[in-house]
Amino acid sequence: MSIEEEWRAAYGGDPSPEDMAYLAEGNARQARKRVSADALIRDQSGRILLVDPVYKPDWDLPGGMAEANEAPRDALRRELREELGLEVPIGELLCVEWVPLHGPWDDLLAFVFDGGVLDAEQVATLRIRDPELRAVRFCTVEEAEGLLRPYMGRRVRTALGAAIDGHAVYFQNGGR
């Protein structure tokens, strides 16, 4: 049974117009979170795939922002396909970071999933397919930290640790 079906069953069918109005009012007052979904993708040497977006001064993990009502894993699949033409299995959740309000941006839940290890053929065929990206490259962790903003470097290190430990991590604003 889907969540929608369970919800309707709890009300014995469709809720009354009064109940729907009350629920809609409550829903309208609740927080709306921005959601990003990135992938930790490595090559066979263990280097990390980074992308260089044209709209940011620093490099980033591949992925992007979820659209309204889009699941984070689905958003990541879409972004990898659109930006890099990559169709890879999206593995386990590695970390989720809550990022507070900053600049013009509301707070954010940033998901990082395990994008696996690309084989030599996948690496050779990797191409930018979206004008939002200027470049892609594989980097060591140390090289990546020189290209990423400090908070992204911490997120990458946290995701790598989670991939090794096998336990997803939640943290806030760059720290645990």
Image: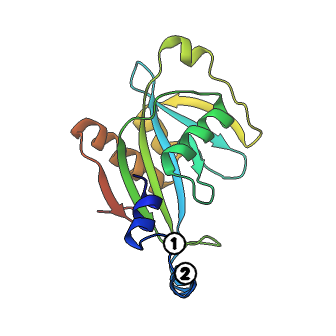
* CB contact under 8 Å: marks 1 and 2: yes
Residue 123 position within the rendered picture, expressed as x and y whole percent measured from the top left = 55, 18
**Residue position for label 1:** 14
Instruction: Residue 170: name its quadrant.
Output: bottom left
Spatial CA distance of label 1 from label 2 is: 9 Å
Residue 173 in view of the camera? no
Outermost residue, front side: 12
Outermost residue, right side: 131
Residue 95 position within the rendered picture, expressed as x and y whole percent measured from the top left = 36, 50
Q: Is residue 149 left or right of residue 11?
A: right
Work out whether 156 lies above or below 118: below
**Residue position for label 2:** 20
Q: Is residue 114 left or right of residue 27?
A: left
Q: Residues within 10 Å of mark 2 (few under 14, many from 20)?
A: few
**Which badge, 1 or 2, comes first in the chain's sequence?**
1
Work out whether 115 lies above or below 153: above
Residue 17 position within the rendered picture, expressed as x and y whole percent measured from the top left = 58, 83
The residue positioned 35% from the left and 45% from the top of the image is: 94
SS assignment at label 2: helix
Of the two numbered discs 1 and 2 in the rendering, the one whose residue sits closer to the viewer = 1
Q: Amino acid at mark 1?
A: Asp
Work out whether 24 lies above or below 66: below
The residue positioned 43% from the left and 31% from the top of the image is: 140
Instruction: Residue 121: name its quadrant.
Output: top right
The residue positioned 58% from the left and 59% from the top of the image is: 69
Q: Along the line of sight, which residue is nearer the eye, 154 or 84?
A: 84
